[in-house]
Amino acid sequence: MIFSKNQKMVDVIHADFHLLKITDRFGIKLGFGDKTVLSVCSEYGINPDFFVEMLNVFHDKNYFPRENLKSFSANTIIDYLETTHRYYLKDKLPEIESLIEILVDKCSAENKGHYKLILKFFHDYRGEMKDHIRREDEVVFPYAIEVENAYNSGNVSDTLLKRMKEYSIEDYYKEHEDIEEKLFDLKNIIMKYLPEPENSRLCYDVLNELFMLEKDMNDHSRMEDTVMVPKIIEMERAISGNKS
């Protein structure tokens, strides 16, 4: 099923309730009645075409219109990526941490050491993820916006040209940390090596959250690596070509 901006927002959520996290990420509150996606987006000042693409990307793993997404400005794409970063840091990571802490608290004394190692592993992962996000928010994204502004205006400063020679978006792409790998390792440890938990349901809840975070982050990385990065590379090359 492919969603369109002329559908009722409530019908979209009924079709896939997981998309509530997307509406929340865009700042859309519940109580949208029978309004269409287009009407709700207009009310919140959201680009409806971009919003619908995000709904479809998260709804269908086989849906990823890279060229369509590249048609949106870097500002629009980065606004969404930064909002997703805030969702990870303020909501999702603390939620998972709380679940693991409860899991540790409820396990038997003989198994507590094993489960505390899981909590430490997650703390280390969270620290790496925070560093990764901080670098993108403070270095990579401002640079991408600066390149786009220069490309659109034709006003390219010597400072930007120097930065492009010293560090381009291609360098970022080559260095892009694979933080998803550590998340995969954590899931494997829980499923394969932990002693049988006293509360299996709670353990399943932790795994469910980790799997959902992994899927979300994979979609997030696709946006960065196959949409934003190639878009900025094209602009860098155009700017360099005009200045050569």
Image (tube, helix red, strand yellow):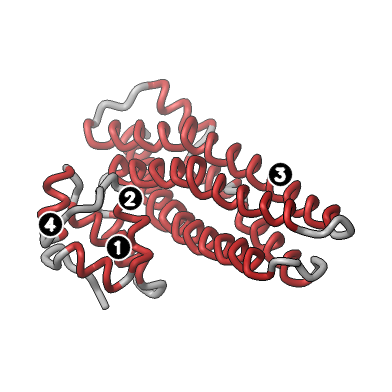
Q: Nearer the viewer, mark 2 or mark 1?
A: 2
Residue to which mark 4 is pinned = 38
Tell me which residue sits at (41%, 32%) in the image: 142
Q: Is residue 146 left or right of residue 134?
A: left
Judged from the image, the secondary structure of the residue bearing numbered disc 3 is helix
Q: CA distance from mark 2 to mark 4?
A: 16 Å
Percent position of residue 162, x then y: 47, 26
Q: Nearer the viewer, mark 2 or mark 4?
A: 2
Q: Which residue of the protein is positioned furthest toward the right in this rendering?
A: 110
Judged from the image, the secondary structure of the residue bearing numbered disc 4 is helix
The amino acid marked with disc number 2 is: Asp
Q: Residues within 10 Å of mark 3 (few under 14, many from 20)?
A: few
Q: Does residue 124 appear in this view?
A: yes
Residue to which mark 3 is pinned = 124
The amino acid marked with disc number 1 is: Leu
Judged from the image, the secondary structure of the residue bearing numbered disc 2 is helix
Q: Nearer the viewer, mark 3 or mark 2?
A: 2
Tell me which residue sits at (73%, 49%) in the image: 119
Residue to which mark 1 is pinned = 55
Q: Earlier in the sequence, mark 2 or mark 4?
A: 2
Judged from the image, the secondary structure of the residue bearing numbered disc 1 is helix
Q: Nearer the viewer, residue 12 or 74?
A: 12
Residue to which mark 2 is pinned = 24
Q: CA distance from mark 3 to mark 2?
A: 27 Å
Percent position of residue 32, x then y: 17, 55
Question: Does 59 sit above or below residue 229?
Answer: below
Number of marks in picture:
4
